Image (cartoon, rainbow, N blue to C red):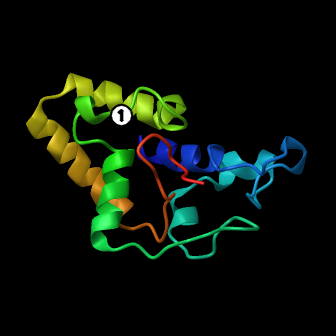
Amino acid sequence: IYEQFIFDVIEQAPNRKSKREGSYLTIPVHRRIDMAQPELLQVLELPFDQAQYCVCTPDQWKMHFDRIFPSSVQEARVSGQNFPSCSYYKSYIALASSVNVKDLVKIRDALRKEFDKLAWAPWTSADRMWGT
């Protein structure tokens, strides 16, 4: 689920207003599968030719984690952009639906340990992975 999350971050990266202009990503389409590794998000060298960033407070970082990996199925977003179409999200929600609360806490703790190794993550909004 975590590795798929990294891939989905890259796949869902915002495009320019015109499809002709393509993505802001500097990773060529044919290399995205290979380069979508956790290490890509563990360095401050962003794979975009334009980006706006914010240094998060611990509370903001937690907010983004909670949006990416909700603490309950009830908190999951079933509409909106990005999240419901992401493979990692579908797998995560299916897993969260099949375990008890105690086990979901353990799962989220393990995911949080990995998430906290990242140098950057998308600036999420309530219904989308990438707030633009």
Q: Give coordinates of residue 29: x percent, y percent.
A: 79, 47
Say what secondary structure mark 1 lies in. Answer: helix
Q: Residues within 10 Å of mark 1 (few under 14, many from 20)?
A: many
Residue at the spot 56% in from the left edge and 49% down from the top edge = 9
What residue does disc 1 label?
A: 92
State the residue lying farthest toward the right: 20
State the quadrant of the C terminus.
bottom right
Q: Quadrant of the N terminus?
A: top left
- All told, the count of numbered labels is 1
Place residue 71 in its image quadrant: top left
Look at 11% across and 35% down and name the residue there: 101
Q: Is residue 7 above or below residue 64?
A: above
Q: Is residue 87 left or right of residue 68?
A: right
* Type of amino acid under label 1: Tyr
Q: Front-most of 82 and 34? A: 82
Using residue 17 as the reference point, say whether residue 51 is left or right of it.
left
Locate residue 8, reporting x and y percent: 56, 43
Residue 105, image x, y percentages = 16, 44
Q: Quadrant of residue 43?
A: bottom right
Nearer to us in this view, 30 or 22: 22
Most distant residue in the left direction: 102
Above or below, 67 against 99 in this view is below
- Which residue shows up at 58% across the image and 64% down it? 40
Say which quarter of the image contains residue 12. top right
